[in-house]
Image (tube, rainbow, N blue to C red):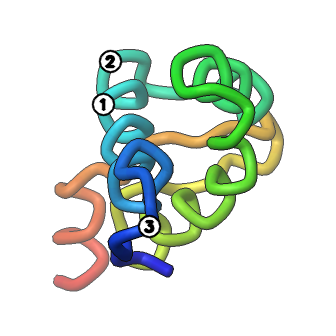
Amino acid sequence: MLTPTKHTKIKYSTIYIAGIILKYIQKENIVKYEDLKEILVGSLGVKAKPRLNVSLTFLFSIGKIKYIKELDAIALVDENEIENENS
């Protein structure tokens, strides 16, 4: 679920983890999937690992990230890219 319930620890919610992912990708520009997983587990613990894919799917669905298949990496979507495609 995207929204936490009263039993959800906020640091394991999809939106919180998505925010952490966005901050890291903004700093690094392109991040390999395995590196992102290691960083997330290192900072939040093993319980965050199952939420990684859900958080990435959320960010992809709202157009914030893109997957680079050749590198097995995630990058931010450039806002100018989107505007040029829509023109």
* Tag nearer the camera, 1 or 2: 1
Q: Could you give the CA–CA distance between mark 2 and mark 3, rounded to whole angstroms? A: 32 Å
- Identity of the residue drawn at 49% across and 49% down: 12
Amino acid type of the residue that numbered disc 2 sits on in the rendered structure: Lys
Q: Position of residue 46 (x, y in %)?
A: 73, 32
- Identity of the residue drawn at 39% across and 25% down: 24
Closer to the camera in the image, 5 or 15: 5
Q: Could you give the CA–CA distance between mark 3 and mark 1, rounded to whole angstroms? A: 26 Å
* Callout 1 secondary element: helix
Q: Position of residue 26 (x, y in %)?
A: 31, 28
- Identity of the residue drawn at 30% across and 76% down: 85
- Callouts 3 and 1 close, C-beta under 8 Å: no
Q: Which comes sooner in the sequence, label 3 or label 1?
A: 3
- Identity of the residue drawn at 37% across and 76% down: 5
Mark 3 neighbour class, 10 Å CA radius: few under 14, some 14 to 19, many 20 or more: few
Q: Position of residue 57 (x, y in %)?
A: 57, 69
- Callouts 1 and 2 close, C-beta under 8 Å: yes
Query: Mark 2 sits on what residue?
Result: 27
* Tag nearer the camera, 3 or 1: 3
Question: Does residue 12 appear to the left or right of 45 in the view shown?
Answer: left
Quadrant into which the C terminus falls: bottom left
Closer to the camera in the image, 78 or 23: 23
Q: Could you give the CA–CA distance between mark 1 and mark 2, rounded to whole angstroms? A: 6 Å
Q: Position of residue 71 (x, y in %)?
A: 78, 34
* Callout 3 secondary element: loop
Mark 2 neighbour class, 10 Å CA radius: few under 14, some 14 to 19, many 20 or more: few
Amino acid type of the residue that numbered disc 3 sits on in the rendered structure: His
Q: Which comes sooner in the sequence, label 2 or label 3?
A: 3
Amino acid type of the residue that numbered disc 1 sits on in the rendered structure: Lys
Mark 1 neighbour class, 10 Å CA radius: few under 14, some 14 to 19, many 20 or more: few
Query: Mark 1 sits on what residue?
Result: 23
